[in-house]
C-alpha cells in the first residue's frame, strides 16, 4: 500500500481541528499506515479560503480531493464545517467509515502522477 497524500485544512476559530487530525491518524493506523504524514495547513484569510476552495474547518484532502465534496450551497470562508454522518446525524467531523474508505482507496491506487 502506498501512503496517500493527506492534508488537513483548518481555521484557528474551529475547535474540531485536533479531533479531526486524531481521527485521520487513527484511520491511517487502522489501515496499517501509522507513519503516513498528515500535513496541516492553516487557512488564515478570506483570500486563502477562496484560493483553497475552503468551505470550513476541518477540511480533509486525500490526494488533493476533498473527502466530502462541498455541496453547492456551502459558502467558501473562515468557518467551522459541518458534516452529515451515514446515520443522518450532524457532526463537526466526517463519518469515520467515509474517512477509512477514502484512505483505503487512495492507499490501494497506483502511484499518482502530479
Image (cartoon, helix red, strand yellow):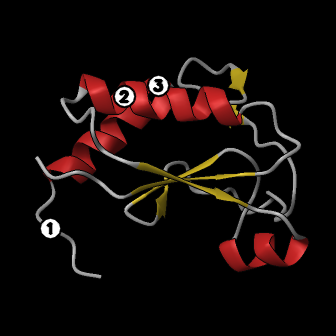
- Pick the residue in front: 103 or 38: 38
Front: mark 3 or 2: 2
Q: Is residue 15 visible?
A: yes
Q: State left or right for residue 33 relative to residue 101.
A: left
Identify the disc placed on residue 111. Answer: 1
Give whichever of discs 3 and 1 has the lower sequence position.
3
State how far apart marks 3 and 1 are (Cα).
24 Å
Q: State left or right for residue 75 relative to residue 64.
A: right
> Mark 2–mark 1 contact, CB under 8 Å?
no
**Corner quadrant of residue 48:** bottom right
Q: Where is residue 26 in the image (x, y as percent from the top left)?
A: 40, 24
For label 3, the residue is 96
**Corner quadrant of residue 24:** top left
At numbered mark 2, what does the secondary structure look like: helix, strand or loop?
helix
State how far apart marks 3 and 2 are (Cα).
8 Å
Q: Position of residue 86 (x, y in %)?
A: 53, 24
Identify the disc placed on residue 27. Answer: 2
> Mark 3–mark 2 contact, CB under 8 Å?
yes
**Please, is residue 90 above or below residue 108 in the view?**
above
Amino acid at each position: 500500500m502506498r501512503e496517500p497524500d493527506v492534508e488537513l485544512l483548518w481555521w484557528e476559530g474551529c475547535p474540531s481541528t485536533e479531533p479531526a487530525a486524531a481521527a485521520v491518524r487513527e484511520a491511517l493506523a487502522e489501515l496499517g499506515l501509522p507513519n503516513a504524514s498528515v500535513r496541516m495547513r492553516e487557512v488564515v484569510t478570506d483570500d486563502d479560503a477562496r484560493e483553497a476552495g475552503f468551505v470550513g474547518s476541518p477540511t480533509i484532502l486525500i490526494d488533493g480531493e476533498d473527502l466530502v465534496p462541498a455541496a453547492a450551497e456551502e459558502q467558501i470562508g473562515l468557518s467551522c464545517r459541518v458534516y452529515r454522518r451515514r446515520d443522518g446525524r450532524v457532526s463537526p467531523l466526517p463519518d469515520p467509515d467515509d474517512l477509512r474508505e477514502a484512505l483505503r482507496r487512495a492507499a490501494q491506487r497506483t502511484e499518482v502522477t502530479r
